[in-house]
Image: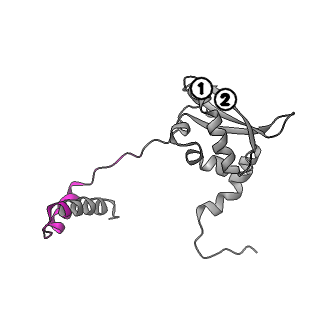
Amino acid sequence: MTRYRKSARRVSALVERDIRRLGEKRGFSETRLLTHWPDIAGPEVAGICRPVKIGFSRNGFGAVLTLLTTGAQAPMLQMRLPELRERVNACYGYAAISRIDITQTAPTGFAEGQADFAPQPKAKTAPRPEAVARAKETAQAVGDEGLRASLERLGANIISKARP
């Protein structure tokens, strides 16, 4: 009989084993390289490439990290490879990566080669008009204009996102 915990658990704890198993298929023994790629590579580099796999060469020490980028960004990425290799090795804590290869892709294509590397910013939604009116009503007693305007914006966002 299976027992279930009644307390809440983090989502990362629930999927950690599956992510590790899928990452290890591509040579990523340390999944932090995949999950924290923008932090490791920096926002500029992470916006133009992503790690695809880590392989081991037949001769020599260290692994080979393969990055996916578009053809137009490859020369810019090539210039940053020494710095990027140092950052990735800092993630591992030792000189795990000896070489970085670049694989180029078209801007559109198969699921693996799609060129959208950076996450899209979330679209902001405007608060509902009735929420704005109710927030103005609530904050009208505040004397300072700047504080009142801030409270009105905050209140309108809270009221519009509240469940009916």
Q: Quadrant of residue 97?
A: top right
Closer to the camera, 40 or 13? 40
Q: Amino acid at mark 2?
A: Ile
On the rendered structure, is 141 left or right of 105? left
Disc 2/disc 1 C-alpha distance (Å): 7 Å
Residue 49, x across and y down, in percent: 58, 35
Rate crowding at label 1 as few (under 14), some (14 to 19) or many (20 or more) other CA atoms within 10 Å.
some
Residue 160, x across and y down, in percent: 29, 59
The residue stretch that appears in magenta: 122-147
Q: Looking at the rendering, in which quadrant would you find the C terminus?
A: bottom left
Q: Does the segment drawn in magenta span residue 66?
A: no
Q: Which mark is residue 104?
A: none
Closer to the camera, 113 or 84? 84
Q: Quadrant of residue 11?
A: bottom right
Q: Residue furthest right?
A: 59
On the rendered structure, is 67 left or right of 45? right
Residue at the spot of label 1: 74
Q: Earlier in the sequence, mark 2 or mark 1?
A: 1
Residue at the spot of label 2: 102
